[in-house]
């Protein structure tokens, strides 16, 4: 089945630095990927839709200059948290849909970011 | 705007028993999809079952089945013969048109041995 790999699974960084999280579709091409944020014991909040070869579409209230998304190929999307602050600490999850038109998303295992 | 509501923050079930998790949604769309996802302690989201709104027949996947009431905008998940491995957070999700999913707040299921 379709597999999405997310890396790193956890990362600790200092306040003010930038962190990049990768999301790869391992055995299928993904024209569209989605980035979610999940706070402890809460639901998934869609941050942005990542489209291969074009700019990402951000949800209302999500700072596009803070959360840079790049989808340079059909198998890789990256989320860069720029100038990270402690309030950016969270669990970030990516998902992808198979470009053949399947009606479900496949999720990565998530990345836990802790900003000191 | 579409919304998904899960009114049960936490549920418990005895091993081998049956439990039903509730989900209601609000939409003006006629064509959409509904899903139940499981998130175990590993945090990996796993698709449990899905339902296309145009299908009247309730979806079934082994021990998991849904009760889809389109007019009532209700989409409950029934887990039969509950197993310890079923313990997890369960999220109801809605999708229409684009692949933007809207998730409910989740129900934590505890399975008692």
Image (tube, coloured by chain):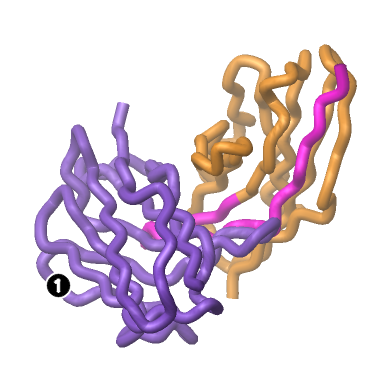
Chain colours: A purple, B orange
> In the rendering, at what x and y percent does residue A17 appear?
33, 78
The N terminus of chain A lies in quadrant: top left
| Residue A57 can be seen, yes or no | no
Give SS at disc 1.
loop
> In the rendering, at what x and y percent does residue A48 appear?
37, 71
Q: Quadrant of residue A20?
A: bottom left
Q: Could you classify mark 1 by the number of other residues whose Cα lies within 10 Å: few (under 14), some (14-19), or many (20 or more)?
A: few
Q: Quadrant of residue A64?
A: bottom left
Q: Quadrant of residue A107?
A: top left
Q: Chain of mark 1?
A: A
For this view, does A111 lie left or right of residue B92?
A: left
In the rendered view, would you say A69 is above or below B39?
below
In the rendered view, would you say A39 is above or below A6?
below
In the rendered view, would you say B34 is above or below A116?
above
In the rendered view, would you say A112 is above or below A51?
above
> Image point 58% across, 52% down: which residue?
B93
Magenta segment: does it hold B70? Answer: no
For this view, does B76 lie left or right of residue A102?
A: right
For this view, does B47 lie left or right of residue A84?
A: right
Magenta segment: does it hold B104? Answer: yes
Q: How many marks?
A: 1
> In the rendering, at what x and y percent does residue B33 appear?
51, 48
> Image point 84% across, 21% down: which residue?
B18
> Image point 37% across, 51% down: which residue?
A95
> In the rendering, at what x and y percent does residue A101 appear?
26, 44
| Residue A69 can be seen, yes or no | yes
Q: Which residue is mark 1?
A: A54
> Image point 77% across, 14% down: which residue?
B81
Residues rendered magenta in the picture: B93-113
């Amino acid at each position: 089945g379709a597999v999405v790999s997310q890396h790193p699974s956890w990362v600790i960084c200092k306040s003010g630095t930038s962190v990049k999280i990768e999301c790869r579709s391992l055995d299928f091409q993904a024209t569209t990927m989605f980035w979610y944020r999940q706070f402890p014991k809460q639901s998934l909040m869609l941050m942005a839709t990542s489209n291969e070869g074009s700019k990402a579409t951000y949800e209302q209230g999500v700072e596009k200059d803070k959360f840079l998304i790049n989808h340079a190929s059909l198998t890789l999307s990256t989320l860069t948290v720029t100038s990270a602050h402690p309030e950016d600490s969270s669990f970030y999850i990516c998902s992808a849909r198979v470009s053949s038109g399947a009606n479900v998303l496949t999720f990565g295992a998530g990345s836990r970011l802790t900003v000191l | 705007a579409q919304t998904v509501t899960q009114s049960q923050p936490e549920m418990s079930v005895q091993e081998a028993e049956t439990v039903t998790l509730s989900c209601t949604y609000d939409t003006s769309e006629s064509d959409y999809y509904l899903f139940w996802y499981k998130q175990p302690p590993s945090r990996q989201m796993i698709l449990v079952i899905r339902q296309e709104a145009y299908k009247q027949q309730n979806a079934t996947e082994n021990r998991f089945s849904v009760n889809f009431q389109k007019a009532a905008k209700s989409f409950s998940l029934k887990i039969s013969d509950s197993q310890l491995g079923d313990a997890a957070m369960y999220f109801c999700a809605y999708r229409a048109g684009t692949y933007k999913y809207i998730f409910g707040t989740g129900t934590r299921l505890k399975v008692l041995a």
